[in-house]
Image: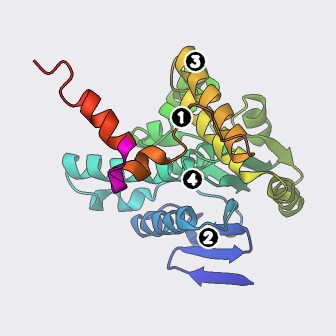
Amino acid sequence: MEHTETYQHIEYAEDGEVARIRLNRPEKRNALSMKMSDELISALDRVQESRSIKVLVIRGAGDHFCAGDDITEMPLWGDANDVMRRVRHYQSMANRLEELDKLTIAAVDGFAVGGGLEITMACDFVVATERAKWGMPEVDVGITPGWGGTTRMARLIGRRMTKEVNLLGALHSARRARELTLWNRVVPNDALDEAVDELVEVLLTKNHQATRQLKYIINRGVECDLYTAQGFEALSGALSASVNGAWQVSDADHGLGVGGFAEKSKLWETRRKAAKDFWTD
């Protein structure tokens, strides 16, 4: 049964295992007002708290995905310290989206620039129409990106291309985003809904314990050295084996250590007696 909730600047709906967020300021090309950002954080928290939602789709109302932060509101942000606090708030929003233990899809039509592009970079999948345009034009307003336009982008497409995108401020085609691996797929202008629904259908067939683990180790592993990343892979392999039934390791406690603490069992007393005064001089 579908549940729909309308905030002031976004729409939120749940239908079984799928949640959908629609940025809903079409008259402003869905520019991210402060109110919209607060509502988006609230919706993301709701998705994270759900045990039934498996996939989240984010899109924009009307002809555009999102034209970025609402620059007309920026004088309201306050002094330099207030601006830093606001930027960190938006970084937290992007981090929430990136770290959801659900699979996320950005369905992009029209403009996805500035903050709109930063939203797509925090999603797992991006499907866009042929007419979609993207870029980071902040440089021509005399400002710099705050929550992914330099950081996530450099991790996705490299330092040199990130400089080109940010220092020139051009608007690029959806095909270019696909070539750079910034986005996943480009579809005909009238086929976005169908393409997204097909992707959702495939994703819902997956073992979602496995997808949660994969998303986690990929996101964490890309930020660290190879050996540390391989540690995540190894632990994930063990967790997979455990949840698939092979959890009884012969020399593990099988819960006796935790239970022994509560009950002050012989096992607990033996271990503590051996350890509590060992090498304490």
Give the labeled residue for mark 2. 26
Give the labeled residue for mark 3. 160
Q: Is residue 157 left or right of residue 194?
A: left
Task: Report whether residue 206 is seen.
Answer: yes
Element at badge 1?
A: helix
Q: Quadrant of residue 230?
A: top right
Relative to 262, is 42 above or below?
below
Give the labeled residue for mark 1. 152
Q: Position of residue 249 (x, y in %)?
A: 63, 34
Q: Is residue 91 left or right of residue 158?
A: left
Q: Amino acid at mark 2?
A: Pro
Q: Are marks 2 and 1 in contact (CB under 8 Å)?
A: no
Give the labeled residue for mark 4. 100
Prevailing SS of the magenta stretch: helix
What segment carries the magenta color?
A: 261-266
Q: Nearer the viewer, residue 173 or 260?
A: 260
Q: CA distance from mark 1 to mark 3?
A: 13 Å
Q: Amino acid at mark 3?
A: Arg
Q: Nearer the viewer, residue 264 or 230?
A: 264
Question: Neighbour class for label 3 at 10 Å: few (<14), some, many (≥20)?
Answer: few
Q: CA distance from mark 3 to mark 4?
A: 29 Å
Relative to 10, is 208 above or below?
above
Q: Is residue 188 left or right of residue 108?
A: right
Report the residue at 14% width, 21% height from top.
280
